[in-house]
Image: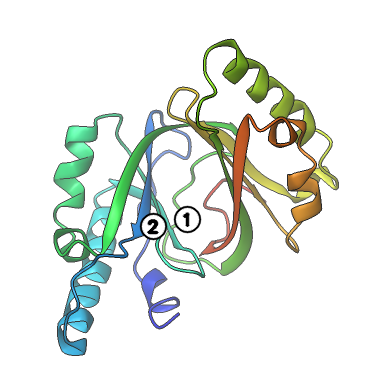
Amino acid sequence: MKYLYALFLAICLSLGSANAQPYLFVFLNTNPNKPVLPKEQVDSIMAGHMANIGRLAKEGKLLIAGPFYDGGGIFVLATASKDTAWEWLRTDPGVRANRWNIELLPYHPRRGGVCPVGEQYTMTTYQFVRYTVAEGVSGEQVRKAWETHERHLRTFSPADSVVAEGMLGGEESAIFIYRGEPREAFIKADPALGENHLRATLREIFIARGSFCEK
């Protein structure tokens, strides 16, 4: 939590179009094998990480950023090109120092959107669920699993507590973001999970309100 609040002092300053397509969703997953470094060096890396976030946001390249409470975080980048995304990401001292394992996935919002929040924003906590296809599931099973999953999400109540929902990659993964307390019982009741076709990971994210075009 040391850098939790500081991480957002410089993010999302761009005032570009709220829903310009396409996007890449970036997971900065904590690297369990990251080098053990002196505190002073880690502090310097994180200061550079912060400065880089601000610069990329001002340039309109970084649209959304937020840390998970249990480590790591997310970016949403204004490009469909992974090569371009890596050019931008490699300017981050934390990425160069292997502080995270990076995943890049095309993001296709189905509810909510992508809205840079500008210089005035309020931080908030949301529940963040990532769904992935279970190992060994393929073909028609995958398609049916996502259809079953989507039907289940439509029953979420209250509906206005849903912040965002969308697909990552082709049919590789999906996210579901909502306000309020963790709803593990609802998540686990998803028939696609019960059939062992999908897996779900529930986390909390700290992010600028309005990042997903929510009211």
Mark 2 burial class by Cα count in 10 Å: few <14, some 14-19, many 20+: many
Q: Position of residue 204 (x, y in %)?
A: 59, 63
Residue 98 visible in the shown view: yes
Residue 125 numbered tag: none
Circle 2 sits in a helix, a strand or a loop, which is it?
Answer: loop
User: Is 111 located above or below residue 1 in the figure?
Assistant: above
- Do labels 1 and 2 touch, CB within 8 Å? yes
Q: State which tag comes first along the sequence, 1 or 2.
A: 2
Residue 12 numbered tag: 2
Q: Position of residue 99 (x, y in %)?
A: 25, 65
Quarter-wise, where is residue 50 in the image? bottom left
Q: Position of residue 141 (x, y in %)?
A: 61, 16
The N terminus lies in quadrant:
bottom left
User: Is 161 located above or below residue 93 in the figure?
Assistant: above
Q: Mark 1 belongs to which amino acid?
A: Val
Question: Which residue of the protein is positioned furthest toward the top in this rendering?
Answer: 140
Q: Which residue is mark 1?
A: 117
Identity of the residue drawn at 66% across and 33% down: 196
